[in-house]
Amino acid sequence: MTLAEQDPIKLLIVSGIDGSGARHWQTEWERDLDDCYRVELGCWDDPIRNVWISRLDQAVHEAGGDVVLVAHSLGCQAVAWWARLLGSSAVPSVRGALLVAPPDVDQQDVDRRLDRFAPNPDVAFAFPALVVASRDDPYATIDRSREIADQWGAAFLDAGDLGHINADSEIAEWEEGQALLPLLIGGTRDRNQLSHLAADLLAKHRRGSKRTPFHAARERDAARVQLPPASMFFDDGMIRGDRTFGIDAGD
């Protein structure tokens, strides 16, 4: 099989409570990046842990190839619980996980719905994982976020003051997050090395580095970037319509 014939890596978007709205960076990615699918976890406003991890498991298996999981907020705990309870059979297909702003589900009196995913699961991911956290996230302190990353054996990136790294953070398509994806696709497994690479990349990006970002197109009507085949980093693609992946919840 030639490189051109290899299936591209799929991004599976794993959202948190209430899903991700029109202004959320996950929605921007789903719309703008080729081979990017939202996992339909269902019961968005009243999450059930076992339902979420079951539907994530089915989405990963139905992807039929290599995937990168892109989770936000409680979606991070869904990925962690899935990896602990069901993920072993799908590990070869998971190239990595970008886990953004995981909440502290063990904290009391924040949101009763978080309690259903407590305690924060002890799991050592069998694939590269990067936790990205904000210093002023109302759902987890930066120190607690670092502890969560340690609990999962994941690399850690302090993204500065970005709130919950959501639509209210006013980061649009969150270019910095897209720039991190090749690190996971590249297969760097050493968490310390991955942390250092991510911090260096973030610093360069914020200094206006000219290195090629994950997405090459700046205008919505321009050519879009397709997720690369397993052995490549970049591959131009064309715009597509919105798509979802997994079970339709019907909620």
Image (tube, rainbow, N blue to C red):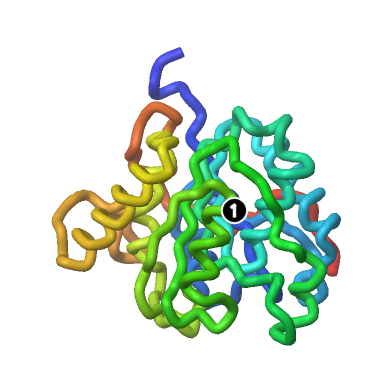
Residue 225 drawn at (x, y percent): 37, 48
Describe residue 84's horizontal placement relative to residue 193 as left or right: right
* Residue wearing tag 1: 151
Could you tell me which residue is drawn at 61 percent across and 42 percent down? 124
- The quadrant holding residue 14 is bottom right
Instruction: Give the tally of numbered discs.
Output: 1
Name the element at disc 1. helix
Could you tell me which residue is drawn at 14 percent across and 56 percent down? 210
- The quadrant holding residue 228 is top left
**Can residue 223 be seen in this snapshot?**
no
Residue 141 drawn at (x, y percent): 51, 76
- Few, some or many C-alpha atoms within 10 Å of disc 1 (few <14, some 14-19, many ≥20)? some
Q: Amino acid at mark 1?
A: Gln
Q: Is residue 45 above or below residue 189?
A: below
Could you tell me which residue is drawn at 48 percent across and 84 percent down? 168
Residue 104 drawn at (x, y percent): 63, 71
Describe residue 154's horizontal placement relative to residue 92 as left or right: left
Could you tell me which residue is drawn at 73 percent across and 52 percent down? 81
**Can residue 236 be seen in this snapshot?**
yes
Q: Residue furthest top?
A: 1
Front-lying residue, 37 or 127 = 127
Residue 165 drawn at (x, y percent): 47, 74
Describe residue 210's horizontal placement relative to residue 62 as left or right: left
